[in-house]
Amino acid sequence: MEEHHEAYLVWKYARVQGLIPIRDNTLLHIDEHSDMASPVLNTSLNKLNGDLRRIKKFIYRELNIASFIVPAIYDRLFSSIYWIRQRHNKTSPRATHCYVRSVSNKGRKLITQQKSLLELCPNDYDELKKQIVHYRFYKQHVEQMASLKNPILDIDLDYFSCVQDPSRKGFFIEITKSEFERFNQQVYHRIRFFDSGRVEAKKEKGKYYYHFNHFQDEYTSPLKVDRKKILERIKNTVAALKQRVGLPGIITICRSKFSGFTPEDQCEFIEVALLSELKKIYPIERVTHISQLV
């Protein structure tokens, strides 16, 4: 995959094709980010069913790279999530017991919380119990990885070397003259309060632009490491997989290159090295790109 929300389409495809069980799979998510945001959708998950063409449109229109796992839990694809990260603040072999539900059971606005918080809603408790989907959530480091049988293996290349905040990389969008004037006249213009970092309106060669995150200096991400460290992490990860993880139902690998989380100058190196090591422990006959599925 190029970006991680595309995994939702792969998982749905794998279920339709009978490559994985219909429900209650275990997800082994090796990623510097949890990707466990709860989305608010216009399309109801209750109505997607197994229509892969509709799902493909849905992921690009409504999901993002941080909000694709919770919908899969809501669909009962996963009942256990193992998040492997380089630097967790706290890890435990024990699961945090959580749930997902949708507001009014419509499949649009999803809410995920610890199960213990459900009991704080005594007025709605009995009704909510009928709607919720339970799951177990684990946070672990690779050396603590649990022994798992036939999980869905999901790897993001930014686990091995990462740009901490790629949104700080500047870009610009052309705007109209009236919008340029409106922005400069209004100190409370709405776009100033979007979570987009620094924004300025500029005129250049007779055209008008929003400039996002234009900074004088460039800063190196503290999460980016050199090739030697990357290879060490890949070997350690694959060794842990070989020792503790049975043959995965499927393996999804995300580049995270366009979003900028995997350093552009390291992305291909990481991908080639990772696939080479994975082929030593799993019978990988071919690699399919997301664009070839539907």
Image: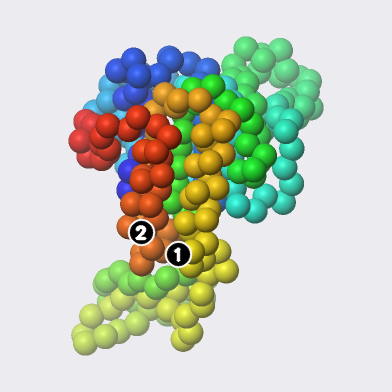
The answer to whether 86 is drawn above or below residue 79 in the figure is below
Question: Vertically, is 290 above or below 52?
Answer: below
Whether residue 3 is visible: no
Q: Which residue is mark 2?
A: 269
Residue beneath the point at 72% across and 51% down: 89
Q: Earlier in the sequence, mark 1 or mark 2?
A: 1
Q: Quadrant of residue 292?
A: top left
| Depth check, front residue: 125 or 81 | 81
- Is 123 situated left or right of 279 in this image? right
In the image, what residue occupies the spot 21% across and 85% down?
206
Amino acid carrying mark 1 in the image: Arg
Tell me, yes or no, if residue 269 can be seen here.
Answer: yes
Residue 92 locus on image (x, y percent): 74, 37
Q: Which residue is mark 1?
A: 227
* x and y, in percent, of residue 27 in the image: 52, 30
Q: Position of residue 272 (x, y in %)?
A: 33, 52
Amino acid at the residue labelled 2: Phe
Answer above or below: position of 14 versus 197.
above
| Label 2 crowd bin: few (<14), some (14–19), many (20+), radius 10 Å | few
Residue at 53% across / 53% down in the picture?
Answer: 233
Quadrant occupied by the N terminus? top left
Mark 1, Cα crowd under 10 Å, few <14 / some 14-19 / many 20+, is some
Q: Are marks 1 and 2 in contact (CB under 8 Å)?
A: yes
Quadrant in which the C terminus appears:
top left
Q: Secondary structure at mark 1?
A: helix
